[in-house]
Amino acid sequence: MAMIGDYLLQGVQMCLVLALAPLLTGVVRKVKARLLRRRGASVLQPYRDLLRLIRKEAVIADNASWLFRAAPYLIFAATWVAAALVPTFASGLLFSWSADLIAIVALLGSARFFQTLAGMDIGTSFGGIGSSREVMIASLAEPAMLLVAFTVSLLAHSTQLSTITEVILSPAIGLRVSLAMVLIALVLVALAENARIPVDNPSTHLELTMVHEAMVLEYSGRHLAMIEFGSALKLLLYMSLIGAVFLPVGMARSGDSWPAYAVGLAAYLAKLSVGAVLLGVFETSIAKMRVFRVPEFLGSALMLGFLAILLLFVSRGL
């Protein structure tokens, strides 16, 4: 019975990220609309958009290869697995041994790899521009993400997220400047990886400024639905990661009672709500930067991660 309960909890987490990802996107859009004094669409509109796209026929170019057809499903699968591995309402679940920060970075990198190849597969100019810009962003975002992973792993002596969560919850950690620096670095990386303002604007299709949208212009129907679903899952992944590593308050542990899991679920929903509101406020109050300034933006995240590791080594040596 214990094994059945473990499988059930892991299945609940995998289904939970699928169910909440479009809702998170809808809440962010609603917050932005209300701040701009507009009514805005319903928070359930992303679900309707996905259903509408799934029902439509996929139009594919004549010169598209098998990679163009398979990429949306590979992107969705890799992002879903990565999002399902991040602890949400409870830590130490059945697959927690595979919830490794390095593995999550690798899964996100593989999804980006297939997306950039698919953007160049048709041979359009917009797809090539978007893919080149995505690779440029990834060349700075991935090292910054690895530095964040190395910093928290030095504190927890492990790269497993469940172990990191339990160490952060312990009173021995306390307030550390290095954690604050990597938190800022992770937020900057999350904005860039999710194509959010100020790096990119997900609600426009300006040809000269597009990054993510330029790579998916040739997609339609069910293929576009998979890519949009994967983008929503990635946003949920980063918010869950920030909550699990830097704010694991209320998170249940493996073997706790069902009321503890209910409290963990409520705490997780509260974290997502606060994160959606903060993201909406931030995107409303700041303008999109020029593409040529993106390296400076991500360079600051890279430098913060490097300084956090350096500060941690210096503090240990004293």
Image: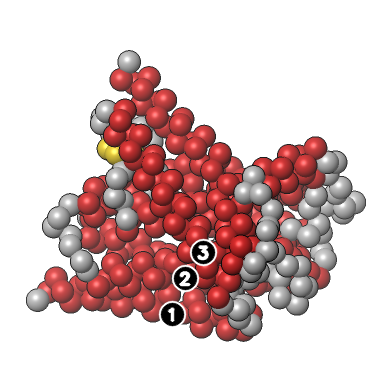
Q: Is residue 105 visible?
A: no
Nearer the observer: mark 2 or 3; the answer is 3
Pointer 2 or 1: first along the chain: 2
**Mark 2–mark 3 distance (CA, rounded to whole Å):** 12 Å
In what element is the residue under mark 1? helix
Mark 1 Cα within 10 Å, few/some/many (few <14, many 20+)? some
The residue closer to the viewer here, 105 or 12, is 12
Residue marked by disc 3: 279
Q: On the rendered structure, is 178 left or right of 70? A: left
| Residue 300: mark | 1
Q: Quadrant of residue 47?
A: top right
2 and 1 marks in contact (CB < 8 Å): yes
The residue closer to the viewer here, 10 or 74, is 10
| Residue 211: mark | none
Amino acid at circle 3: Leu
Identify the residue shown where x is 58% and y is 84%.
293
In what element is the residue under mark 2? helix
In this view, the residue farthest toward the left is 318
Does 207 sit above or below residue 194? below
Amino acid at circle 1: Ser
Residue 198 x, y percent position in the rendering:
58, 75
**Mark 2–mark 1 distance (CA, rounded to whole Å):** 8 Å
Identify the residue shown where x is 22% and y is 69%.
176
The residue closer to the viewer here, 136 or 29, is 29
Amino acid at circle 2: Leu
Identify the residue shown where x is 48% and y is 64%.
278
Residue 210 x, y percent position in the rendering:
71, 71
Nearer the observer: mark 2 or 1; the answer is 2
Q: On the rendered structure, is 316 left or right of 188? A: left
In what element is the residue under mark 3? helix
Pointer 3 or 1: first along the chain: 3
Residue marked by disc 2: 188
